[in-house]
Image (tube, rainbow, N blue to C red):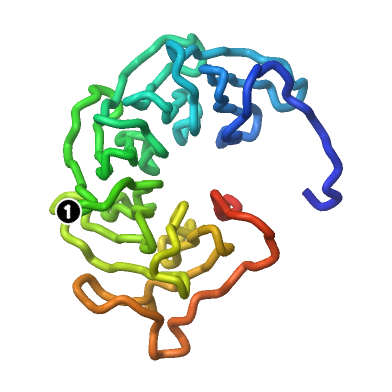
Amino acid sequence: ASSGACIRTFVGHHGPVNSAMMSSDGASVVTAAGDGSCKIWDRSTAECTQTFLLDGAGARWATFSPDSSLVLAATFGDGAKLWNAATGEHQQSFVHSRSICHASFSADGEFAVTASRDGTAKLWRAASGECLETFPDKGHDWVRSAVLSPDGLSLLTAQDGNAVLRDVWTGAELKVLSPFDEITLAVNSAVFSPSGLAVLASSDDGARLCDLEHSRRSAGARPGLPDDPEGAAVSFDGHTGPVHWASFAPM
């Protein structure tokens, strides 16, 4: 990372690679591709150790569970897929009525959340595939990302021009963040900091870091930028095109 030199190249997909994520121990990489597959690679050798096929649907996103034992993938079909990383066995499918934009695990790996073009995010029990909660986007077209807070009590979704913070178990909106000057500008992704005290959001106009203590507005308040200068988002500018995803380095 310090030099920017290419250390490994992972070759084997036959379509665009839409995401690449490292396992928690740093030993493996999982990729999601438009060729209808996800692959696990040995980081040190770049050897492909596992391939998961998606029955013709491309993969938009794939990630490991916190203990690296499972792989969760968001597909261009109507579901997210869960596999055993070691054996390749399919464990669960998490179904929406339209394609999945993003899928992630809770910090303990017990739950999964999915975000979909059907305008909802869903909370699932990972082991059983049971849908525990559905969070509608109040008529908007689609939800682009969904993540749980480090303590598992809040859900953060990216939708339209906002990042919305909700209570996981009641679905109540706790806070609505509008990180970008243009309210009409879509938020492509939103994630918590490792402490859970800040939110990093991306859009077609760069990335912004928002402090939840001095955030844009509470649920029900009017949209807009904060009057308090302490609430102003920190901007990461410099890209000349859309920023599709932004994330924190692990602690």
Residue 114 lies, with reference to residue 148, above or below; the image says: above
Q: Position of residue 119 (x, y in %)?
A: 26, 44
Residue 230 lies, with reference to residue 133, above or below; the image says: below
Which residue does the image show at 41% across and 90% down from the upper left? 228
Instruction: Decide which of 109, 170 is in the foreground and name it.
Output: 170
Residue 87 lies, with reference to residue 236, above or below; the image says: above
The answer to whether residue 191 is visible is no
Residue under label 1? 171
Residue 18: image quadrant is top right
Q: Position of residue 225 (x, y in %)?
A: 40, 81
The answer to whether residue 248 is visible is yes
Instruction: Decide which of 4, 117 is in the foreground and name it.
Output: 117
Q: Position of residue 120 (x, y in %)?
A: 25, 43
Residue 104: image quadrant is top left
Query: Does 237 sit left or right of 53 as displayed?
Result: right
Residue 108: image quadrant is top left
Instruction: Decide which of 59, 28 is in the foreground and name it.
Output: 59
Which residue does the image show at 57% across and 50% down from the upper left? 250
Dot 1: element: loop
Residue 114 lies, with reference to residue 233, above or below; the image says: above
Query: Does 152 sit left or right of 150 as displayed?
Result: left
Q: Position of residue 226 (x, y in %)?
A: 39, 84
Question: Callout 1: 10 Å neighbours few (<14), some, many (20+)?
Answer: some
Which residue does the image show at 63% across and 13% down from the upper left? 49
Which residue does the image show at 33% across and 25% down from the upper left? 79
Which residue type carries mark 1?
Gly
- Total marks shown come to 1
Query: Does 14 sit left or right of 197 as displayed?
Result: right
